[in-house]
Amino acid sequence: KSKLLLDLQKDIEGSVVSYPRSMPIAIKRAKGSIIEDVDGNQFIDFFGGCGVLNVGHSNDFVLEYVKKQQSELIHALDFPTENKLLLIQKIINHLPKSIREEYKVSFGGPTGSDAVEAAIKLAKIKTGRDGIIAFTGGYHGMTSGALAVTSDTFFRNNLTSLMPNVHFAPYNYPYRSTSNNNNEIDGIAYFKNILTNGHSGISKPAAILIEPIQGEGGNIVPEDGYLEELVRIAHENDVLVIFDEIQSGFFRTGSFLEFMNTSAVPDIITFSKGFGGIGFPISGLIYKKEVEAWGPAAHIGTFRGNQVSIAAARGAFDFIEANNIEEHTILIGSYLLEKLQELESENPFIGEVRGRGMMIGVEFVKDKKNKEPFPEFVKKFRSQCFQRGLLFEVGGHYNNVLRLVPPLVTTYNIVDAAIAIMKEAIAVCMEEYLE
Ligand code: PMP
């Protein structure tokens, strides 16, 4: 039956579909960390709806909030509702105490890309400048502005003039650091040069836009001190700092937002994905009051702040608090990381296992010394895992990284089952390469 639906999809849906190409399943239902297809096959979901399902598929606790809300009010544009204002208060109360008074919240459209567009526009309006410095390997979305600041040229093929004055600085990538100087944080000198001395003739930008942990780029955690130094230099030059926390946010790394694991403080934060609780579309900005520059109704949209999505977000916050999910994320994340590090130590092709909380990357290379990327191995490995019932996304600067973003509620038993599948799959792939 799965095949029938996949074939029908090929016939009648636009060829732009992406995920079913590498994970050919037709989904029937899903609960927690488990997906079931239309034929009754079960899959462990380490893909998490692309880092969305932090509290698990169809979480019952969150569903209660959704059911209640949908019988009361669903669509309210940007009118005030108790539901919405409660969520804004919840978001602000989860920021560090010392800075929470400084921030306000606004909702974007339903997608992460909408939030990125809003952040870019706000920075431009506030500063009166139009340049953005983004980072190599960064991913920010598919609408024109968000795409212009996404570095992978694959997505921009045959498209020109998306947005002027975008410049890419190298993202700090500890595993592939090129810095020879131990006192220099890799990537900082280049960044500083762009901002202070001018580079390729770029004028002073409105903002820098960065993921505090790069998601699609391969779940890369930058070196300690990198984000702090970027923020320091940007602020010294009167340039705004936007952290894209669409993927790293909503407790994914064990803290409400990843920047809270550092001492770097951004001016604008984008949010989406996990905020929708169990997959409801929601997005927006958390930004410093001093950055406020919108004129009344200067950035509008029909689907800003859907009430069911907002109720789901409140439900997810309450679920996380009631069940101590922050702590569980840190514990289960380090358990998964440890198990993967065991695989790394036994396997000649795993170059690095890295991550924070439940945002983990496993990078495959042909040779641990020269670190040449090995995307061909990853492709085979992923397919072997898929056949045994484990789903995850592949990404990275060279398409050679397993991107593991499981639901935060994943249990130890499920992690063990996933690791067992990976061990089997890796053995099959190794046979081929070691022959
Ligand atoms: N920013 C980041 C960091 C993301 O990971 C994504 C989605 N992968 C986006 C923005 C875009 O979000 P959306 O797909 O909802 O437009």
Image (cartoon, grey):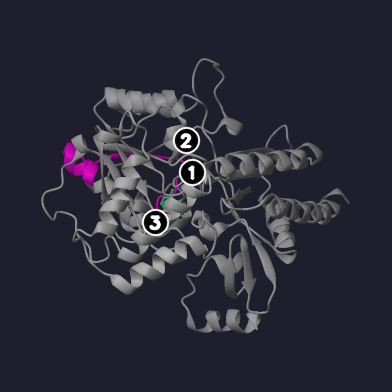
Alpha carbon separation for disc pair 2 and 1: 7 Å
Q: Which mark is residue 122?
A: none
- The answer to which of 49 and 348 lies nearer the viewer is 49
Q: Nearer the viewer, mark 2 or mark 3?
A: 3
Q: Position of residue 361 (x, y in %)?
A: 61, 44
Alpha carbon separation for disc pair 2 and 3: 31 Å
Q: Is residue 178 above or below residue 149?
A: above
Left or right of 207: which side holds 391? right
Q: Does the magenta portion include 126?
A: yes
Q: Earlier in the sequence, mark 1 or mark 3?
A: 1
Q: Which residue is mark 3?
A: 313
Q: Which residue is mark 1?
A: 137
Helix, strand or loop at label 2? It is loop
Rendered residue at 24%/27% (across/down): 238
Q: Position of residue 127 (x, y in %)?
A: 18, 37
Three-letter amino acid code of the residue under disc 3: Ala
Residues in magenta, as a range: 122-141
Q: Is mark 2 within 8 Å of ligand 1?
A: no
